[in-house]
Image: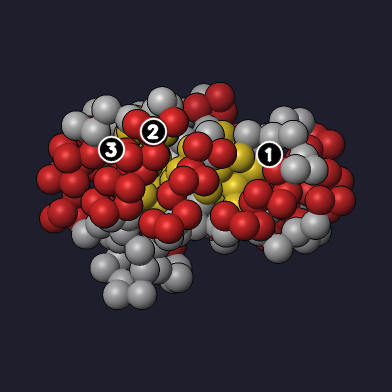
Amino acid sequence: MGLPRVLEAIGAACRRAGRRPEEVRLVAVTKGRSVEEIWERVLRHGPFPLGESRVQEALRKMELLQAEWHLVGPLQRNKAKLAPRFALIHSLDSLRLAEALERVGAREGVRLRVLLEVNLGREPQKHGFLEEELLDAYERVRAMPHLEVLGLMTVPPVGPEGVVRPIFRRLSQLADRLGLPERSMGMSDDFPIAVEEGATLVRVGRALFVD
Ligand SMILES: *Cc1c(COP(=O)(O)O)cnc(C)c1O
């Protein structure tokens, strides 16, 4: 597709849903892509936030590219000290990780911005809180002074619209219920559906890099 067409598709989905395009941010997921590709396919078009799923790969690229970096993949607790390098961590998936991040935030004197990842598809191989754990987890993380919970994130099971749309809708309902503004949902195959269902951050990789 390429970035201009991804933005057009976000705009079209906003019109269908009666939303304003400014409500949706494109996070360009750049894992596995070279610095040259990221420049050519993303940053040449504007200062988009960049999402990486592996900390080490992100750190290497940070040396070479000026951008707002987001972590979208799982963060191991032994790498928690690197969290302050990211403007937003989409993938806070356990209370033990939250406690580790809280200690890092306290030590460095910073407040880390996070999203709680929710495993709405209840897939055993996926990360995130189960829906019934979410309220308690939110209350606990919200009480940590060096973490700022901005919203929720989900990665739905692979499947057709009939599978993913209800999951996106549910994530929006849960965020509404908790009074949280951000919903990180939608990837290359399904971001227009996610926008129709209330996404504020779409995490798009492949569609930006292949025509
Ligand atoms: C890779 C990845 C994406 C982007 O997926 P594409 O299918 O390439 O758009 C989004 N979110 C997470 C968590 C990812 O790991």
Label 3 – label 2 distance at C-alpha:
29 Å
Classify residue 47 by image quadrant. Answer: top right
Q: Residue at x 65, y 49 (%)?
A: 59
Q: Position of residue 148 (x, y in %)?
A: 34, 30
Q: Is residue 200 left or right of residue 168?
A: right
Q: Position of residue 118 (x, y in %)?
A: 30, 54
Q: Is label 1 or label 2 in front?
A: 2
Residue type at mark 1 is Glu
Number of numbered tags placed on the structure image: 3
Q: Residue at x 39, y 57 (%)?
A: 77
Identify the mark at residue 84; answer none if there is no mark.
Answer: none
Q: Dot 2: few (<14), some (14–19), or many (≥20) neighbours within 10 Å?
A: few
- Which one is nearer the viewer's eye here, 12 or 142? 142
Residue type at mark 2 is Arg
Q: Position of residue 187 (x, y in %)?
A: 54, 55
Identify the mark at residue 107; answer none if there is no mark.
Answer: 2
Is there any visible trace of residue 186 in the rendered image?
A: no
Contact between marks 1 and 2 (CB within 8 A): the answer is: no
Q: Which quadrant does the C terminus fall into?
A: bottom right
The residue under label 3 is: 175
Q: Residue at x 28, y 38 (%)?
A: 175
Q: Up-down: is 1 above or below 173?
A: below
Q: Pick whichever of labels 3 and 2 is earlier in the sequence.
A: 2
- Which one is nearer the viewer's eye here, 112 or 150? 112
The residue under label 1 is: 8
